[in-house]
Amino acid sequence: MQPAGRRTVVDLALQPGAIRADEAMARSRALAKLKLSDIAFRHVTRGAAVFVLLLLGGVIISLIIGATPALSKFGLGFLVSERWNPVTENFGALAPIYGTLVTSLIAMVIAVPIGLFIAMFLTELCPMWLRRPIGIAIELLAGIPSIIYGIWGLFVFAPFLQSTLQPFLIATFGEVPVLSTLFAGPPYGIGMLTAGLILAIMVLPFVTSISRDVFEAVPPVLKEAAYGLGCTTWEVVRYVVLPYTRVGVIGGVMLGLGRALGETMAVTFVIGNAHKVSASLIAPGTTISATIANEFTEAVGDIYTSSLIALGLILFVITFIVLALARYLLLRIERRIG
């Protein structure tokens, strides 16, 4: 039973002139409102994207302008000079660049395999009751402020290395060619090796979390098929999981590398802050971020300040090159797969 005065949809559809003028106007206003909201949404999202580009361009321009006095005075020699003398205003970026690359390399060499092994254990071997506690612990490591890592590294980790690991490395490799150079000198506790180990601890949660997430995205049918053929867990991980997730794993590694390159406070505490290039990993050194953090507030004179800004520009370029290479590598992998 239809209520009195109410017509069915069929009657409205078949009866000519059923839609009155006021209903047509209401529909037109509703459509106009939707169109305006859609236009506003399009412009807001476009504005956000343009804002990011403008912000990035502004940062680049400001760095170039600020670094111009130092680069004009020292030229390309700024990149290959080890000198850093604020009194004579003679500056070179080689020592900070060297320290940044070495500490980041140490961190990635240690953190990447350990992070991948942890992710493999969590996704393939770990009991269900243990996965959540380990996952929470990894997330807590990622959430610890860098200054806490620096304080712990200076007062706990560095003295421990000074009395245990560094004397062992010096005694073990002291007579070995090449390795004797890498581990030469007295055990200070602080140094590039200590900074690299601290960075490895800080980078480890990022590599582990991203690797675990991409490993869990592997379709179970692929792993079940491999197990059905008699593959071991290692063979499933090597021939099924890693090939399927290599793009995501490389992305996680690059994210960790970006964190290692730009880390400031933790490295500043434990690297020794010495402007020199040394082949020994246990010798004090410095990084670009540590140099800027230590000296920017004390910079007197245009050349001194400009040299620090030039270091920031160099770090920006290094990070950009690393990300560009990572993107190129991912594109090559995708093309080869597709």
Image: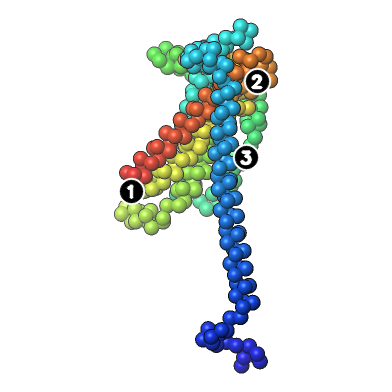
Frontmost residue, 307 versus 295 = 307
Q: In terms of sequence position, does the residue under pointer 3 or pointer 1 come before the other?
A: 3
Q: Viewed as shown, does residue 215 lie left or right of 83?
A: left
- Tell me the mark number nearer the camera, choosing from 3 and 1: 1
Residue at left offset 65%, top offset 35%: 145
Q: In terms of sequence position, does the residue under pointer 2 or pointer 3 come before the other?
A: 3
- Marks 2 and 1, how far apart in space? 49 Å
> Which of the numbered marks, if any, corresponds to residue 296?
2
Q: Label 2 is placed on what type of residue? A: Phe
Q: Viewed as shown, does residue 151 lie left or right of 165?
A: right
Q: Label 3 is placed on what type of residue? A: Gly
> Which of the numbered marks, if any, corresponds to residue 96?
none
SS state under label 3: helix
How far from the left and from the top, in percent, is residue 119?
A: 48, 44
Q: Label 1 is placed on what type of residue? A: Gly
How far from the left and from the top, in percent, is residue 3?
A: 65, 90
Per the image, the residue denoted by label 3 is 143
Residue 278 appearing in the image: no
Frontmost residue, 156 versus 287 = 287
Residue at left offset 33%, top offset 48%: 338
How far from the left and from the top, in percent, is residue 284?
A: 56, 16
Is disc 2 in contact with disc 1, using a CB cutoff of under 8 Å? no
Residue at left offset 57%, top offset 9%: 90
SS state under label 1: loop
Frontmost residue, 246 versus 289 = 289
> Which of the numbered marks, if any, corresponds to residue 338?
1
The 10 Å Cα crowd at callout 2, few under 14, some 14 to 19, many 20 or more, is: some
Residue 2 appearing in the image: yes
Is 14 rendered above or below residue 183?
A: below
SS state under label 2: helix
How far from the left and from the top, in percent, is residue 82?
A: 52, 12
Q: In terms of sequence position, does the residue under pointer 2 or pointer 1 come before the other?
A: 2
